[in-house]
Image (spheres, rainbow, N blue to C red):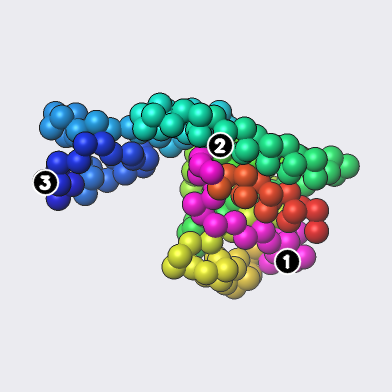
Amino acid sequence: VTLSLKPDFILMDSFYFNVPDIFGEYKDYKDNGINILVTAGSLDKKAELDDMYIDIRQLGKIFDVEDKAENLCKELESKFEVVKAKVKTDKKYKVMSFDSGDDKPIVSAGNSLENLLIELSGAENIFKDVDKQFATVGWEDVIAKNPDFIILHETPDDKGAKNLLNILKNNKEISGVTAIKEENFIIVPLRHTFSGIYTVNAFNTIVEGLNK
């Protein structure tokens, strides 16, 4: 369907190529003469804040609005500095970021942008040593690492991350985990945890959640 529309240009996250039956492969677009930009912030590598600025500047160049792109980058950099000033370093909390999963939780691991945001917040991702962006772990791992806070990903289908909260609260096996016992939950919209203009919002939510 996309190819039949014959677009001049497509802006795309790399995640979509994980489902080639729906979105096809990169070469499908190139072979049909369609210009495509895959965002740097979605590539399968260790995430960096600079990825966001790379994508904004590339779009500025493509659409001949480089000045606007540069101003946006400066605006976002300023917002990050404001949030960084709120970071408290007197205690390094252990944090888990819970994305989904009932029998086995899927968490943000060491290569994710969220791992970087947790570090910038003065905390530590309990799964930082896992060399992936997302990883499936066991509840026994969560118990052993005993996070002080748990970040929950809110999605359009799970407003307020209620489904994730129910999974955690109904699992008696993990009832002794500090974050669950003390109800230390930080709710972040899933889209904000990926590289883009809302990344600073996720950073701010995490910092304020840790400072409660």
Q: Residue at x 63, y 55 (%)?
A: 151
Q: Is residue 140 visible?
A: no
Q: Residue furthest right?
A: 90
Up-down: is 151 above or below 121?
A: below
The stretch in magenta equals 175-197
Question: Which is more N-terminal, label 1 or label 2?
Answer: 2
Up-down: is 195 above or below 101?
A: above
3 or 2: mark nearer the eye: 2
Circle 3 Cα neighbour tier, 10 Å, few/some/many (<14 / 14–19 / ≥20): few
Q: Secondary structure at mark 3?
A: helix
State the residue position of label 3: 4
State the residue position of label 2: 72
Question: Which is more N-terminal, label 2 or label 3?
Answer: 3
Residue 183's label in the rendered image is: 1
Circle 2 Cα neighbour tier, 10 Å, few/some/many (<14 / 14–19 / ≥20): some
Q: CA distance from mark 3 to mark 2?
A: 34 Å
